[in-house]
Image (cartoon, grey):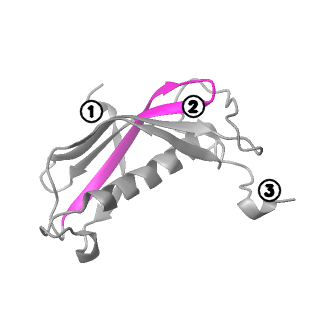
Amino acid sequence: MTAGDITFHTRKWVRPEDLNANGTLFGGSLLRWIDEEAAIYAIVQLGNGFAVTKYMSEINFVSSAQQGDLIEMGLTATAFGRTSLTMRAEVRNMFTRQSILTIEKIVFVNIGLDGTPTAHGYSEITYDRDRLPGEHLKIKDLEC
């Protein structure tokens, strides 16, 4: 898989509150954005609002970003398990197109109402919006 296989959809503006002591993008902020974006991607691909992060492989910080830079994050599904979705992530600088970070493997697990892994029934990526959960239950709705 190459960077050309990833579709970049989400963009972020690097702001002062996102910087570390060196004045560059704080890795923790970037990882939070990636995890959130991966969760949204998993929800769309699995059609379930209850997908959780199971695993992230080695995180390769290639370069950084400065205040004012625009970055873009891309994800693509690489495998579907019975209850899981595996994806690859890349973040790059929109101005320079330089890679900032890559994660070869992020695994999300499809969770049922009982909180255990549940089969999702999919085997390929969708570009349609038809897998969005019809009704997204809130945690308080699960408490009986």
3 and 2 marks in contact (CB < 8 Å): no
Residue nearest the observer in this picture, 93 or 107? 107
- Residue farthest along the bottom direction in this orientation: 16
x and y percentages locating residue 21 in the rendered image: 16, 70
Residue at 26% over, 34% down: 3
Secondary-structure class at tag 1: helix
Residue at 27% over, 69% down: 18
CA gap, disc 3 and disc 1: 41 Å
Which label was assigned to residue 136?
Answer: none
Q: Residues within 10 Å of mark 1 (few under 14, many from 20)?
A: few
Residue at 35% over, 44% down: 74
Q: Main secondary structure of the magenta part?
A: strand
Residue nearest the observer in this picture, 39 or 10? 39
Secondary-structure class at tag 3: helix
- Dot 1 corresponds to which residue? 4
Q: Is residue 80 above or below residue 99?
A: above
Give left or right: position of 50 versus 76: right
* Magenta highlight range: 69-87
The three-letter amino acid code for the residue at tag 3 is Leu
3 and 1 marks in contact (CB < 8 Å): no
CA gap, disc 3 and disc 2: 22 Å
The three-letter amino acid code for the residue at tag 1 is Gly
Which badge, 1 or 2, is on the more N-terminal residue?
Answer: 1
Residue at 74% over, 56% down: 137
x and y percentages locating residue 30 in the rendered image: 31, 57
- Dot 2 corresponds to which residue? 84
Secondary-structure class at tag 2: strand
**Quadrant of the drawing holding the C terminus:** bottom right
- Dot 3 corresponds to which residue? 142
Residue 87 in which image quadrant: top left
x and y percentages locating residue 122 in the rendered image: 62, 27
The three-letter amino acid code for the residue at tag 2 is Ser
